[in-house]
Image (cartoon, rainbow, N blue to C red):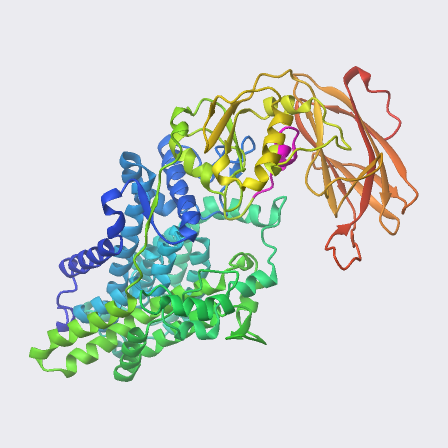
Amino acid sequence: MRRPTERGSGWRGAAGATGAYLAVALLLLAPILPRFGGAILGGPIAGTDGWQHVWHLWWAQRALAGGQNPFFTRLIYFPQGAELYLQPINIATGALVFPVTALFGPVAGYNAAALLAFALAGLAGYLLALRVCGDRWAAFVGGLAFTFAPFHIAKLYDGQLELAALQWLAFYAVFALRAAEGRRARDAAFAGVMLALTGYTSWYYLLFALVYSAAFALLWARLDDAATPARGEKEAGAASAGAAGWLRQWVIVGSVALLLLAPAIVPGLRSLYGGERNLGVVDPAELRAYSANLLDFWLPSFLHPLWGEAVFAFAGQRWHPLSADWNVALGYGTLLLAILGCAAAWRLAWRWLVLAALGTLFALGPELQVGPWQTGLPLPYRVLAALPGADFGRRPLHFAVLTTLALAPLVALGARALLRRAAPARRPLLLAAALALLTAELLPVRWAPLDAAVHPYYDTISPDDGALLHVPPAAYKRVGPQKAQLRHGAPILGGYLARTPRYDLQYAPGIGPLWSMRPEPGQLLDPAGAAGAALSFYGVRQVIVNWEQIDPALRPDVAAALAQVLPGVPPRYSDSALAAYVVPPAEQRPFAYFGRGWYAEETSAERRWRWMGEAGDILLVNPGPTPLPVRLALTLESFARDRDLELRLDGAALDRWAVPAQPTSSRRELTLLLPPGEHRVELRGPADDEGRADSRRRLSVVASDVRVTWGAEAPPATGATRP
């Protein structure tokens, strides 16, 4: 037999609450409802990040429909492709809205995902609050405060869908609570599933869920029936209070989650620490910029139509000059109800108060910031960041999601206290007043739709037409080429990902001048005649220049770069906004170029040189079908002191070289036999600060002469040889 307080807590009550949250979400997204498949909603940041997440849904649908690995694609950063394990690819949401994306397109999929994020997060908040307070109307208020919290709305405003899709984290909290109180294996297994879905949505939220789990497990290690009034008598009697039962539940949760997450976690950790670019390295200044200020929690939301602009000007421009996603306001109505809930039902509330405080504490980041003051006071986040893998969570302020989640039961307890103290005839009025208070405070400013339209020329491109090189290139925060890719489906060079992978093609002959949008004079490693060969080898079939996206002052340089790379080639299509050039066929010939790690070329009279940092690459490309001999001759001088260089070929040790300090030079010749394809000669050595007040360069060696001889013309080896 159920307790009276649970009446209405079944499917009917949950469905009613979900419908109400969905109705409010429809009001929130009302501006784009008439254009559900043609526009998204959001602020300035959503103009880039929002379309990035539309692309994520598009790619997820294509990958899942085609049976491909959704965590790797060659459609961006062509031809090498990009691993997506560490990107906010949001596979869980992609699978959730797969039918919508498949039938109506990725823009409709994005909008459906946004609606579901608010409706389902509201449902999860309702179920969590109902579990604690046992009153469906009070629980509805708690769910409303959670799903329409300023933090949640700000994620939609910024177009950050993986952070707006916080429903799985909230459902995890629901089933974790059920598992802790009821000690049923089924609830623990469901908690593990929800934890896995949280990871497949956002690695940030998975990290936060693990922190939440550790605190939750300790807080709920010992329970008494007074602390869980919403449980039925049968369930309460079946609960096992022993340590063995408690441990068993968490073993089930962890085992299920780990089993489901293993396909992504193992390669994700390899990409984080074992790749060519260590994504685990965190800039302390960046970490501080993306940490909450202590006063942020007590400010009103900067998205409110009445006072939001003043709040943003006062706090955002002063305390968060590098970030626009700092909206962790809790809401005064939410706080008042939570305080009332703590006062009225302390035995039920105190654990949730601890969890809310924990989320706030970790959101403050590695050291306490109070308004304009950097106190230097270390905070517990430093301990968390020191754990293996945890330093990946370099946005501490997002820990505020745990605060808003833990406030849902407290708000519900406060609403329950109000309703119980009032006469029955006045309860509907009090409930309406509480909802009106929350609605008035959480109401966001009305946003303008962001149109999905792209230039009509993209409709003429087929996915089989070959790779596209855009000018300006697809790069960090330049999402236009991927937005156009939603229409044509052809691969593109570069791309916009949250964590930029290594990509040497931006330095290649023919590609480098267009990527940098300026012509390149004769270089130290002379690529004369190699532009066509490089474009052909890397599969570039069209160059598309988006003139309207280029500063008028830079357009002459772009025109000169086009003339250098594609001399005499007329555009296939041209208007004031866009010009498209078809890359003509070119003779296959080997070529070489400087990759990453080299500073810009410098000249003086007839002399040319390039400085290297701690590591520099030289790319050697054999486009033919058979192995090709090549001689690479290098003349180097060391900066300030003698130093030893390590030379590697395609990751394998090749040679060591003692390079003397300037002005003494050293020459080395390497004769190699290269199989078909691209090969990388790596030079690595210690670097020192340049020592000039106007320079932040770190220098190791300088190359003053580099010569490459291919094929039969390559003379016998006079230095190191690689067979």
- Asked whether 564 or 157 is in front, the reply is 564
Going by the image, does 454 lie left or right of 390? left
Magenta residues (range): 501-513
The residue that appears at 72% across and 27% down in the rendered structure is 527
Q: Position of residue 307 (x, y in %)?
A: 34, 70
The quarter of the picture where the C terminus appears is: top right
Q: Is residue 599 visible?
A: yes
Image quadrant in which you'd find residue 567: top right
Confirm whether the magenta stretch covers residue 508. Answer: yes
**464 is higher (above) or lower (below) than 142:** above
Q: Name, please, the residue furthest toward the left.
A: 425
Answer with the quarter of the image where residue 37 lies. top left
Residue 176 belongs to magenta span: no
Q: Residue at x 47, y 31 (%)?
A: 578
Judged left or right of residue 28, residue 612 is right
Residue 416's spot in the image, x, y percent? 20, 76
